[in-house]
Amino acid sequence: MKPTDDAPEFDRAFDHALKLLGIRKRSVRQLYHKLSEKGFDGQAVSEVLSRLQQSKLLDDEEFARGYVSEKTTAHPAGKLKMLRDLKRKGVSHEVAGRAVSELDENYEFNMAFKLGQSKAELLRNLDVRKRRKKVYDYLLRKGFHFEVCREVIRGIR
């Protein structure tokens, strides 16, 4: 797609988009909102997004895979939270689902177990029933499936 006659607007929007992408990866929708909030007109924003997608600098698939990777290492979360967050960031359900499905099938239980044990250790002064409840709620908030949470708290003494 060729820039319109309003090339300065396109150039400024393109430069701003590159600046934003240089800070961190973003979904198409996130970048659309950022550029629109900055006051760039709709046509320039659409052309910028199209150009960035054609050149593979803006890719929701890659964004989703990177987000899932981050959530498995730096800020652990369950699959449900990852799906919810990706949808909120404008990634389609299908793309988010593919990214999350690439996780190891044991990821969710192993991560929930690790987080649950750490949380239980912090709560060791509480009686077992209260500790289990707090760990269960914590794991649910982290986006782990309720069955996984239930399985994890069975091991808490």
Image (cartoon, rainbow, N blue to C red):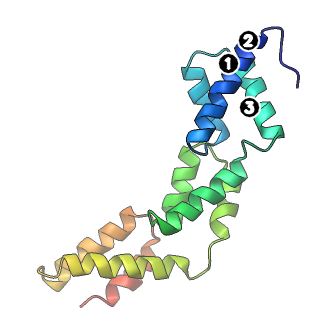
Q: From the image, state whether disc 1 or disc 3 is nearer to you.
A: 1
Image quadrant in which you'd find residue 19: top right
Tell me which label, 2 or 3, sits earlier in the chain: 2
Question: As shown in the figure, which amino acid type bears the numbered disc 1?
Answer: Arg
Q: Is residue 49 above or below residue 108?
A: above
Residue 43: percent from the left, percent from the top? 75, 17
Image quadrant in which you'd find residue 55: top right
Spatial separation of the CA atoms under disc 1 and disc 3: 13 Å
- According to the picture, the residue beneath numbered tag 3 turns out to be 49
Left or right: residue 152 versus residue 67 is: left
Residue 137 in view: yes
Q: Residue at x 83, y 18 (%)?
A: 3
- According to the picture, the residue beneath numbered tag 1 turns out to be 12
- According to the picture, the residue beneath numbered tag 2 turns out to be 8
- How many residues crowd around disc 3 within 10 Å: few (fewer than 14), some, or many (20 or more)? many
Image quadrant where one finds the N terminus? top right
Q: Residue at x 33, y 88 (%)?
A: 154
Secondary structure, mark 1, is helix
Q: Are marks 1 and 2 in contact (CB under 8 Å)?
A: yes
Q: Residue at x 65, y 59 (%)?
A: 65
- How many residues crowd around disc 1 within 10 Å: few (fewer than 14), some, or many (20 or more)? some
Spatial separation of the CA atoms under disc 2 and disc 3: 16 Å
Q: Residue furthest top?
A: 5
